[in-house]
Amino acid sequence: MPIYEYKCRKCEETVERIQGLHDGPLKKCPSCGGKVERMMSPGAFQFKGSGFYATDYAKKGEQPASCPAASGGAPPAACGGCPKASAGE
């Protein structure tokens, strides 16, 4: 279940609540009874290390060595739709 964070407009206290997706939002501060608003919080997990981004989407400008357009040679007919092959012409 997600954890929602609320801040009271009156006493400025921050409250965290574990609520189901179908539960209504908190409306009153449990401390003073003032009106609360839901805060935007960062995600609970982070991607760290050399993950898929570094291996699958690294450096857009580089072409793999197996690409005929990378070596400067004439690309075969199979490369006709490749934007990298047309850039070398």
Image (tube, grey):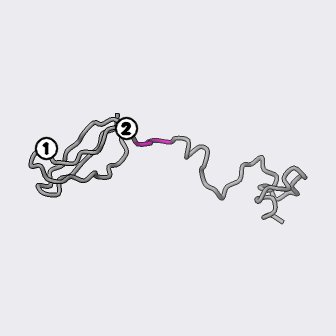
Q: Give residue 28's position: percent from left, percent from top.
A: 17, 48
Could you tell me which secondary element the residue under label 2 belongs to? loop
In the image, taking residue 57 as reference, residue 82 lies left or right, namely right
What type of secondary structure mainly makes up the magenta span? Answer: loop
Q: Which is more toward the observer, 48 or 31?
A: 31
Of all residues, the one furthest to the right in this rendering is 77
Q: Give residue 75's position: percent from left, percent from top.
A: 86, 55
Magenta span contains residue 48: yes
In the image, taking residue 7 as reference, residue 62 lies left or right, namely right
Magenta span contains residue 14: no
Residue denoted by label 1: 30
Quarter of the picture containing the N terminus is top left
In the image, taking residue 73 as reference, residue 63 lies left or right, namely left
Nearer-N-terminus badge (1/2): 2
Within-10-Å neighbours for mark 1: few <14, some 14–19, many 20+: few
Q: Amino acid at mark 2?
A: Leu
41 versus 84 height, above or below: above
Q: Give residue 23's position: percent from left, percent from top.
A: 32, 38
Residue denoted by label 2: 21
Q: Amino acid at mark 1?
A: Pro
Q: Give me the residue at 24% from left, 45% from top.
A: 26
- Give the magenta part as a residue range: 46-50
Q: Give me the residue at 14% from left, 53% from top.
A: 34
Q: Which is more toward the observer, 3 or 33?
A: 33
